[in-house]
């Protein structure tokens, strides 16, 4: 892992300096100052560099200057934290094979932005994420000759002395967040033959031990004793047994609130007997993106010592095809007690979440209940890959989550939970069915199904992250993990901490 440190002056000059520059009214003045210092004619710089998002322009400093290369890094006009993250992430990803060992990021060349800590946190976060290597199973490592050993790279953040404390805290946050996100990337990107429900359980146990929160794993027998019948039903067709992961983080002082989190942990979704078409089935290794988000939030909240009492619950299983699999038309039980007619075995996420949600409500009585799940193709048809769906029976909760989305750049858009949709799930033979039988409003009817298992909890939010848990990126030709939800939920909790009304 790269080393970061605060530096107040460019005395020990780094070999290369990155100067992040936004398109703002003073951009010209900033460029003029850089021109003076480097001896490059200002017209050239202004002509060649527009500070557009992710734009990079290299200057070679005149003789006598210690920083030999200066990278002007465009941040665009809006300069949201996600823009800064993406600019640094893309910069480092492209250049990581040829980095000098001492690198600097300068906030001295421009008028220091008001939110310097936010910029620093985002820059550090982006730099670390940009070093992600998705080639986990490649046997041939890349050519050594040009590859910088990234663990030896040290990065100085240059700013005025008065900002030292803030910057150091921001470095620590950006780093803590990135470390967890990188772990989540690996977990979500892992193929299903390397990632079983047991693997998720082991990850949680290891993380809990390392960062000081408790983890209890229920194996198949434990799940049977608990009576998680819907989870067991989904697991019937798989060779690997299910796990039920219960994580608890207790802060040192009085908690601000008790929050229950539930994540869909389907380690591979074939669809079961209602089998999926094969064309994009390989992406179903990421059908545990909700679980990964919950696990990431537990870890990061513990690292950051957030003042919340958190419960993270992950029902984990594969959804496979076998003679033992549940069949369309089967009637199964649930932890809640309601009977469910399984119209489509591919609507398995809502079944295991039903058990997870009801368990959290009954056992922990949280003030706030949130679930995350790669739940429906319908949500992708609604929002494409640009946003997930947000459902909530509580306006304050929904508004706070939406505000947090705005802050972190993880987009969710609210959809209704009107009772009109409920009748779609009426079963002739059981208490409820898991699919209406029609493709209309699939994301909403899925949410309505979940609502039947929260025991009228007054502050519940459901995030359908099917379209955003994996996305296109510089890391790979295929879609890969985003760790969607991790920064978002931490930002949501921050908003409760300050107790400012939303
Ligand atoms: N895991 C899928 C949803 C999904 C689809 C996630 C594409 C990511 C990308 C879920 O289990 C599923 O198959 N849902 C079905 C439900 C339907 C049968 C009612 C769907 O949305 O098609
Ligand atoms: Zn499915
Ligand atoms: Zn699924």
Image (cartoon, helix red, strand yellow):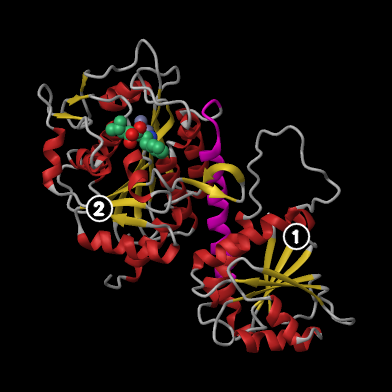
Percent from the top left, x then y, of residue 281? 46, 30
Of 95 and 259, which appears nearest the observer? 95
Q: Note whether residue 120 is visible.
A: yes
**Vertically, is 106 above or below 33?**
above
Q: Which mark is residue 153?
A: 1
User: What residue is rendered at 29% in x and 58% in y?
Assistant: 257
Left or right placement of residue 490 versus residue 260 in this view = right
Q: Main secondary structure of the magenta part?
A: helix
SS at circle 1: loop
Residue 415 badge: 2
Inter-mark Cα distance, 1 to 2:
46 Å
Asked if residue 289 lies left or right of residue 21, the reply is left
Q: Quarter of the image containing the C terminus?
A: bottom left
Q: Nearer the viewer, residue 414 or 457?
A: 414
Precedes in sequence: disc 1 or disc 2: 1
The answer to whether the residue bearing label 1 lies less than 8 angstroms from the nearest atom of ligand 1 is no
Residue 85: quadrant of the picture = bottom right
Would residue 352 be seen by someone viewing this image from the given angle? Answer: no
Query: Does 290 appear above or below 101?
Result: above
Tell me which corner region of the image, top left, top right, bottom left or bottom right, holds residue 477.
Answer: top right
Between circles 1 and 2, the one closer to the viewer is 2
Tell which of 365 and 473 is nearer to you: 473
Residue 270: percent from left, percent from top: 42, 25
Q: Quadrant of ligand 3?
A: top left
Residue 179 inside the magenta-drawn segment:
yes
Q: What range of the chain is rendered magenta?
A: 168-193
């Amino acid at each position: 892992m790269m080393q970061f440190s605060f530096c107040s002056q460019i005395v020990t000059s780094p070999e290369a300096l990155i100067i992040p520059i936004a398109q703002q009214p003073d951009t010209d003045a900033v460029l003029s100052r850089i021109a003076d210092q480097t001896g490059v004619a200002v017209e050239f710089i202004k002509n060649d560099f527009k500070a557009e998002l992710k734009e990079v322009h290299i200057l070679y400093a005149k003789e006598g200057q210690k920083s030999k290369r200066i990278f002007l890094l465009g941040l665009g006009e809006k300069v949201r934290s996600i823009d800064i993250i993406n600019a640094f992430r893309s910069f480092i990803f492209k250049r990581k094979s040829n980095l000098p060992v001492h690198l600097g990021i300068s906030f001295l060349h421009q008028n220091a932005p008001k939110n310097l800590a936010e910029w620093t946190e985002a820059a550090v976060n982006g730099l670390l994420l940009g070093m992600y290597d998705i080639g986990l199973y490649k046997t041939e490592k890349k050519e050594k000759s040009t590859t910088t050993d990234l663990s030896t790279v040290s990065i100085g953040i240059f700013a005025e002395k008065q900002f030292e404390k803030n910057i150091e805290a921001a470095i620590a946050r950006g780093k803590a967040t990135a470390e967890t996100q990188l772990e989540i990337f690996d977990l979500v990107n892992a193929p299903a033959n390397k990632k079983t429900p047991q693997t998720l359980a082991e990850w949680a146990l290891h993380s809990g031990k390392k960062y000081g929160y408790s983890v209890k794993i229920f194996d198949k027998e434990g799940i049977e004793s608990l009576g998680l019948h819907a989870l067991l039903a989904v697991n019937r067709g798989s060779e690997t047994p299910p796990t039920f992961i219960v994580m608890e983080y207790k802060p040192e002082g009085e908690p601000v609130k008790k929050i229950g989190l539930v994540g869909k942990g389907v380690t591979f979704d074939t669809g079961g007997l209602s089998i999926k078409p094969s064309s994009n089935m390989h992406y179903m290794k990421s059908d545990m993106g909700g679980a990964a988000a919950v696990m990431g939030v537990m870890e990061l909240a513990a690292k950051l010592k957030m003042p919340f009492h958190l419960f993270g619950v992950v029902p984990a299983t594969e959804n496979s095809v076998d003679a033992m699999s549940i069949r369309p038309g089967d009637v199964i039980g649930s932890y809640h007690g309601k009977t469910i007619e399984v119209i489509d075995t591919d609507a398995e996420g809502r079944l295991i979440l039903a058990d997870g949600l009801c368990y959290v409500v009954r056992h922990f009585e949280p003030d706030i209940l949130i679930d995350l799940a790669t739940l429906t193709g319908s949500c992708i048809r609604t929002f494409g890959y640009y946003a997930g769906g947000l459902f909530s029976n509580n306006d304050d909760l929904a508004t706070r989550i939406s505000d947090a989305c705005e802050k972190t750049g993880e987009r969710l858009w609210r959809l209704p939970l009107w009772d009109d949709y409920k009748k779609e799930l009426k079963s002739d033979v059981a208490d409820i069915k898991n699919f209406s039988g029609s493709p209309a409003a699939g994301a909403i009817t899925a949410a309505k199904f979940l609502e039947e298992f929260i025991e009228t909890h007054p502050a519940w939010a459901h995030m359908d992250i099917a379209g955003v848990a994996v996305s296109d990126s510089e890391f790979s030709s295929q879609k890969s993990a985003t760790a969607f939800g991790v920064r978002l939920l931490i930002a949501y909790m921050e908003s409760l901490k300050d107790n400012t009304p939303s």
